Image (spheres, rainbow, N blue to C red):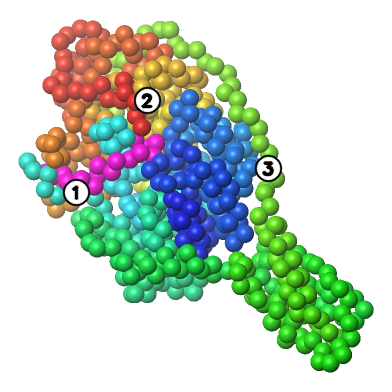
Amino acid sequence: MEILSPAGSPEALRAAVRAGADAVYLGFGQFNARRGARNFTRDEFASAVSYCHLRGVKVYLTLNTLCSDRELADAVDCAVQASKLGADAVLVQDMGLVRALRQAAPDLPLHASTQMTLHSLDGVRQAADLGITRAVLARELSRTDIAYICERSPIEIEVFVHGALCMCYSGQCFLSSAIGGRSGNRGMCAQPCRLPYGWGDLADGYPLSLKDMSLAGHLKELQDMGVASAKIEGRMKRPEYVYIVTKVYADALREGREPTAEERRQLEQAFSRQGFTDGYYMGQTGPDMFGVREETKPPRELFAQAKAAYEKGEGPGVPVKFYAMIRSGEPIQVGVEDGQGRVATAAGKIPEPARRRPTSQEEVEAQLGKTGGTPFTAAGMRTLVEGGLNVPLSAVNALRRQVLDELSKQRTALPQRRHGEFKVGARYENRREEPELYVSLRHAGQLTFELVKARPALITLPADEIAAHPDDAAGAIQRGVTVAAVLPRICFDRELPRLREDLAACREIGVTDAYVGNLGLVPLCKELGFTLRGDFGLQVFNSQGLKEYKRLGFQSLTASFELKLAQIRDLSKAVDTEIIGYGRLPLMITENCAIKNQSGQCTCGNVTQLIDRKGVRFPVEKAWGCRNELLNANKIFLADKAEDWKKAGLRAVRLLFTTENGVECTQVLEAYRGAGAYRPNNFTRGLYYRDVE
């Protein structure tokens, strides 16, 4: 199992390598999920790859953010440059970037970032079908879930083992962008989840701030499962932290043990939020998983020791085996071989007969073993030294240096890969017809006779709501209104049978369309014969993404609500495209039930609101699978901006109803048709008119 460490700077990279990392991940340019990290220039990246490859360490480039159409070519160029410089793989989130890189760098391995929200076997298989060679699983999975996926996965599996935990599933959080215009999906998260919130009238707690995770104590189990890579989070952390954490995990893994009590104490000293948690891994959520960063003095002695070690030391060293053959009448032969079978050889002068004391085998081996000042360490010798010969030890030293130099060149040689030009491809024109109005309901109780009578072009309901209230949905269908099932964004493998039953019930009453917000549910929908519609969870941010989802069989897609209307207008719409034009946007979806954590019991039927430091209240609702969705305090309202969204080339504008009653749903629909005087008390234009970082 690979130990994969963060490298937010050249110093952190050296710290990781010298602590024993097998691989590092780092940013190059502005297209990664930690744009606030130091990151690397082109020259620094080239040096980093050479430094790492010489020492047997792989380098993964992080390009795991969403890219707009204007940014995509630069992101592709960044990946192509990295590929030419020898990067071993690139981490990606954006489906459009996946498509573009298959074209421009077909031999460059792709890893699916945790930002792709992969959490099921079918999701991993879908990634494999896209040409992805490794999937980084969501942090919320339990040991049982991980083992199930590893046993059946066609590609490598990477699992986070240490570092910060987000309250929301990675790739599905919009809290930072909605509040301050800084998108976590574009590498600029402001971490508002770490701020105080409350459940009454005061923000007097930290219900969204999880402790850091630590799976120290579970390394052997992860290795036995078949996990390919154990990932340490922390590209924003200082090099001393990287060294300490990497060394603890690397030493334990190589020595076939779990970290000791002292090593765990060092992990906590380096950084923690009131300790660590392995709650998700153990399948035990709850209040014990939460904590905050306390103001404490940095562990100066521990950090000083770490700094001294990574600044002066060379790390564990690359084990090599030396060969030497010294025989009468033949040139001196010296060779070296690394663990990957690379061999370098060199020949010297013919040895002379010894006039006094002949050179011994032990003396030759002692010279070969002097690898100080190099990344190599002698792990074995095979020498043949005939008696009676005189071999200058300086000659042996020179041959050792020569073969190690040659081996170094082989280890740092750039890979031979194909690289092509990124081509935008066919341009699809915008629709000229006026967008239709779709209605998305959260509860069957919102599906009133008046709403059906108002005849929106389409009504959506969660699949489980349709299954639980089949007559309501069937009645709408009989009156000529199309009803679509909305699938949950999160569905573990163990939950799939229940969802299958709900979808089968939907099919029985005539539901033919399904809104899918995660790749993992595409196979199930195809199997059951649904028309695929892409929900906002797919994070459609550019024209290439639209084309790729079309290739996967989607008939329509929802554009990311982190795009401006002008950007949405300019998308090349390969399939029908819609936006969410009204409602409380879901800012978080969480595995930890914040409602139960607060009350100690399941009270999802009640209206629950989280209050921030400014007195703003965010509704928290139950999501499928006993999860939570944190909704925005203000509703998006664009009824009075119809001239703008009507020019965006959309098939539809979707009205998203969550906390509204049936009467309000009908009033909002009429307002978007230009009738009535409905206007919410507090509303926002969302990000449709302002840039998001």
Q: What residue range appears in magenta?
A: 183-199
Residue 384 percent location from the top left of the image: 80, 82
Dominant secondary structure of the magenta stretch?
loop
In the rendered structure, the answer to whether residue 181 lies left or right of residue 55 reads: left
Q: Which mark is residue 376?
A: none
Question: In the image, is residue 4 above or below residue 691?
Answer: below
Between marks 1 and 2 in the image, the one whose residue lies nearer the viewer: 2
Regarding residue 226, the answer to whether it shows in the image is no
The residue tagged 1 is 207
The residue tagged 2 is 563
- What is the secondary structure assignment of the residue under circle 2? loop
- What is the secondary structure assignment of the residue under circle 3? loop
Question: In the image, is residue 151 above or below residue 464?
Answer: below
Residue 137 percent location from the top left of the image: 43, 49
Report the Cα–Cα distance between label 1 and label 3.
48 Å
Regarding residue 547, the answer to whether it shows in the image is yes
